């Protein structure tokens, strides 16, 4: 990131600031390490995947089932999950599920945004401290200001969602309240904490701007994120309990403590997945804001500022987006480990078609992200060296995208089937199954990283003596990884059985990660003290800004789509295996119906975000005082 | 304003493009399993086998995993003669179960799949000692023993083997009805009524309605109900009494008969009332 530093280099930070920085990092690292150690200790398979009715307290022997005597039953009789019949669900004339769907999705979009923004801004603020470039700080503050209304909008949708659930699904909500009990109050208390840190972080921005006070401000930001993320993981536990209940027995009676209820097998995979996705989501929304501002002005300075803001947001968004599929793999693997049936419902059952739409969306994201980078190369004079490679990267992306969207089973009429000799095409059919998709996705990620690497190199000339050797090393890393990804996909995907097929995808992912990590390390070392070529912020075609709109739209739509899958894999259960859904909407709707719903929520979200930006801009607008005697 | 319209238009068009893609795909609805009422006491063997096939493909969700290679996540059952294969497996030294014949083996693999795991199909890292298959007598599939028998019959019959499982006896049928109700209400209910008098007594029909006069008790007298209502109307007024309420009466009739009565009981009562002319 620091390659785009402005020409007026800041002064070296004072000793006091450097010590403050070290202390702050040491404390943060200590917390992180402690958290990781705790997580690793907890994450043995036995502890993570606790089957229903077999709750085990960490470090203690497995609780064996005992037949309670009469005295026990009298004192603590477990309450089973309710079994509501259809008439127990209030009928208000329109689909209850549609109402809850819209409210839940809008709440989640905004919740993701207001969690993402502080996370994103803290990263930007830290970058500002490290580079000494005040533009980072100004940008972070500007975006904090415009997203402030988002917190209220989140709360409004959250409250409406809770009310809708209590009114429309009273038995279900009664059961959830019974299971989670006091935890819900803890959730409420955390809002007070979050609000405290939110307002002190925002209003204290300029009061705590330099020196040691800056570290106070960063700490406020850290606490804001900590309370926000705690809120997120608490809410996640409700969703994951519904998918894979733990801490309750076969009929849904609570047999474990709140920690055992929360710590279901899918909780941490969802936590990680949403955490990473939030950063990427926040980045794309900030990018769209910058793009809009860029297009709205002709002032070269403002265009330069918003071009830089768009680039920085996009950089963070795509960087966060790259590991997202791997977090998705983990989640899916845990779903399969918890219940084969649930996994197959998602990936091989009626929901399988939806992954074609997912491919279109992720393909859009990667193509738009890459296009923006290529267009951005026009900012620097040194990019000519790499422009020749763009067409090859584009070709790889397009071919992989087409493989990804190829369905396994073709939609054909009876006569077409007889002509083809079956519903699988002899060439396209094999491209329709998972191994081909895995190859395509991994190659797309590698290609995207290559775009990044070229972009980052475009305004630099390495001065270290071993630069040619470094370049020579990078080429075989790419080649070996690409060969490995293709070989693993083809050999284990088509010539061995399913068990190896799934296992080989881990090695493919590892190859991709090796390229990314090796590329970052090598470039960091190689371009130390590099000669910097001039960059011209604002020198980018207008059409590149539309890529910054495509990203949040595709991202929002993708979140909606994945929400539909996550919720649908429970099929006709409110809480999988313990509480049946007997409401009139207890079926999985068609993909087109879901598409309509997702479009409705995406458009509503877009309008709400526009409102948020508009309101924020009002505060910086002041009406001119009317001339004396003039109309008011 | 122009920029706003252009960017909004672009965003909207992209959103609609994604929606359009969803319209190109097959539109499938994932219906919740419907509880089918099957009169077990009047089944023929052919019905029994067809029921087994239906359970295998639908409620049992067996075909989610048991598909032909390379798609399946479990051995292809429908494409294999399971009876011949069962004998091989029973003779295998890795077999740990207690089954003596093919039918027993198949039942055992449904309720305790880890007793014998087909080589290479076990859970990852367990060296084929643990099966990834869920016990199908437990939620979320939760088939009853009476539902597993027809599946075995289907698997035997599909490869022209002799069907060795017996059709359910009337006692079995009756006990299924009563356990189902126990499960759905959480309370112990009486066994299904054998005669219409028993049924009326069990649901206290006589308490509220006079059967042999037109006198009003809590509900209307039913001496001539067969002339006033059709078969469907009588059925509806029992199953969903608040749908149509006779003039001058409050909605006092219990609304949970549909959940409590067996189909046979309901049929008996409806037929009895239809005769009241």
Image (spheres, coloured by chain):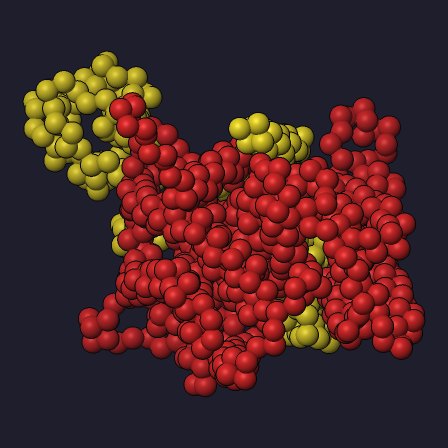
Percent from the top left, x then y, of residue A180?
33, 63
Q: Quadrant of the N terminus of chain A?
A: bottom right
Which residue is outermost to the top? B227
Which chain appears red? A
From the viewer's side, name the closer residue of B214 and A327. A327
Of the 4 image quadrants, the one containing the C terminus of chain A is top left
- Determine whether, in the image, residue A128 is placed left or right of residue A191: right
| Residue A67 appears anywhere in the view | yes
Task: Inspect this view and state whether residue A181 appears.
Answer: no
User: Looking at the picture, how far across and down is residue B182, in whole percent?
Assistant: 32, 53
Looking at this rendering, what residue extends furthest in the front direction? Answer: A628
Front residue (pair A614, A134) = A134
Q: Is A575 above or below relative to A553?
A: below
Coordinates of residue A474 in the picture (x, y in percent): 86, 68
Residue under the point 89% across and 77% down: A465
Apparent side of residue B198 relative to residue B211 in the rendered image (left or right) = right
The residue positioned 65% from the left and 64% from the top of the image is A8
Q: Which quadrant of the figure has residue A59?
A: bottom left
Residue A578 % position (x, y)? 41, 57
- Point 76% across, 45% down: residue: A375
Q: What chain is colored yellow?
A: B
Q: Residue at x 62, y 32 (%)?
A: B10
Looking at this view, is B139 or A11 the one in front?
A: A11
């Amino acid at each position: 990131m620091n390659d785009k530093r402005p020409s007026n280099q800041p002064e070296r930070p004072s000793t006091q600031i450097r010590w403050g920085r070290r202390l702050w990092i040491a404390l943060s690292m200590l917390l992180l390490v402690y958290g990781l150690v705790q997580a690793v200790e907890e994450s043995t398979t036995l502890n993570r995947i606790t089957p229903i009715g077999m709750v085990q307290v960490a470090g203690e022997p497995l609780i064996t089932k005992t037949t309670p005597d009469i005295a026990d039953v009298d004192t603590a009789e477990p309450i089973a999950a309710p079994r509501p019949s259809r008439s127990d669900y209030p009928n208000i004339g329109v689909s209850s599920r549609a109402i809850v769907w819209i409210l839940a999705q809008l709440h989640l979009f905004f919740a993701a945004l207001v969690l993402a923004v502080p996370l994103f801004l803290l990263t930007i603020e830290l970058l500002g401290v490290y580079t000494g470039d005040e533009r980072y700080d100004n940008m972070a503050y500007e975006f904090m200001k415009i997203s402030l209304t988002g917190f209220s909008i989140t709360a409004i949708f959250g409250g409406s969602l809770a009310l809708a659930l209590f009114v429309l699904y009273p038995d279900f909500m009664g059961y959830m309240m019974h299971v989670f009990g006091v935890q819900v109050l803890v959730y409420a208390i955390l809002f007070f904490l979050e609000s405290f840190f939110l307002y002190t972080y925002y209003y204290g921005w300029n009061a705590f701007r330099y020196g040691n006070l800056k570290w106070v401000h960063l700490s406020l930001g850290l606490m804001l994120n900590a309370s926000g993320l705690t809120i997120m993981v608490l809410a996640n536990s409700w969703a994951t309990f519904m998918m894979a209940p733990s801490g309750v027995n076969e009929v849904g009676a609570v047999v474990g403590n709140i920690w055992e209820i929360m710590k279901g097998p899918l909780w941490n995979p969802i936590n990680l997945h949403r955490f990473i996705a939030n950063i990427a989501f926040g980045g794309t929304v900030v990018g769209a804001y910058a793009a809009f501002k860029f297009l709205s002005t002709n002032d070269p300075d403002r265009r330069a500022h918003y071009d830089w803001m768009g680039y920085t947001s996009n950089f963070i968004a795509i960087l966060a987006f790259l590991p997202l599929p791997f977090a998705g793999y983990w989640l899916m693997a845990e779903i399969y480990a918890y219940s084969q049936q649930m996994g197959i419902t998602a990936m091989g059952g009626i929901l399988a078609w939806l992954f074609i739409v997912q491919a279109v969306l992720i393909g859009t994201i990667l193509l738009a992200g890459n296009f923006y980078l290529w267009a951005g190369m026009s900012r620097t004079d040194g990019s000519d060296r790499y422009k020749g490679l763009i067409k090859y990267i584009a070709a790889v992306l397009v071919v992989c995208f087409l493989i990804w969207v190829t369905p396994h089973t073709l939609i054909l009429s009876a006569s077409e089937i007889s002509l083809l000799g079956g519903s699988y095409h002899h060439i396209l059919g094999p491209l329709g199954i998972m191994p081909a998709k895995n190859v395509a996705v991994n190659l797309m990620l590698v290609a995207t990283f290559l775009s990044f690497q070229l972009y980052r190199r475009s305004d630099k000339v390495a001065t270290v003596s071993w630069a040619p050797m470094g370049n020579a090393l990078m080429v075989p890393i790419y080649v070996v990884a690409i060969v490995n990804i293709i070989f693993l996909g083809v050999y284990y995907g088509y010539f061995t059985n399913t068990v190896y097929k799934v296992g080989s995808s881990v090695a493919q992912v590892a190859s991709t990660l090796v390229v990314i990590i090796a590329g970052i390390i090598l470039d960091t070392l190689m371009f130390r003290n590099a000669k910097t070529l001039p960059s011209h912020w604002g020198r980018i075609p207008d059409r590149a800004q539309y890529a910054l709109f495509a990203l949040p739209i595709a991202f929002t739509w993708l979140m909606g789509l994945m929400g539909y899958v996550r919720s649908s894999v429970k099929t006709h259960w409110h809480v999988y295996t313990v509480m049946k859904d007997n409401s009139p909407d207890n079926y999985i709707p068609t993909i087109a119906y879901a598409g309509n719903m997702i479009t409705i929520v995406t458009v509503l979200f877009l309008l709400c975000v526009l409102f948020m930006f508009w309101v924020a801009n009002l505060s910086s607008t002041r009406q001119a005082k009317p001339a004396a005697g003039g109309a008011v | 304003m122009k920029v706003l319209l252009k960017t909004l238009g672009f965003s909207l068009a992209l959103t609609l493009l994604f929606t359009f893609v969803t319209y190109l795909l097959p539109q499938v609805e994932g219906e919740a399993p419907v509880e089918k009422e099957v009169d077990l006491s009047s089944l023929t063997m052919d019905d029994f086998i067809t029921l087994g096939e239906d359970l295998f493909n639908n409620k049992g969700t067996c075909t989610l995993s048991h598909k032909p290679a390379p798609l399946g996540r479990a051995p292809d059952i429908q494409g294999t003669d399971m009876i011949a294969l069962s004998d091989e497996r029973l003779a295998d030294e890795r077999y740990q179960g207690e089954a003596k014949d093919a039918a027993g083996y198949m039942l055992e693999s449904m309720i305790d799949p880890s007793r014998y795991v087909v080589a290479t199909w076990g859970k990852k890292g367990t060296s084929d000692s643990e099966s990834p298959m869920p016990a199908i007598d437990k939620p979320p599939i939760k088939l009853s023993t009476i539902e597993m028998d027809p599946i075995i019959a289907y698997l035997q019959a599909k490869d022209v083997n002799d069907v060795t499982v017996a059709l359910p006896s009337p006692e079995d049928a009756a006990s299924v009805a009563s356990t189902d109700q126990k499960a759905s209400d959480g309370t112990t209910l009486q066994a299904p009524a054998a005669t219409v008098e028993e049924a009326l007594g069990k649901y206290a029909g006589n308490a509220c309605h006079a059967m042999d006069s037109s006198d009003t008790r809590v509900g209307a007298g039913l001496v001539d109900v067969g002339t006033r209502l059709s078969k469907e109307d009588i059925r509806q007024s029992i199953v969903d009494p608040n749908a149509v309420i006779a003039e001058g009466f409050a909605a006092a009739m219990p609304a949970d008969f549909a959940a409590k009565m067996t189909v046979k009981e309901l049929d008996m009562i409806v037929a009895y009332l239809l005769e009241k002319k």
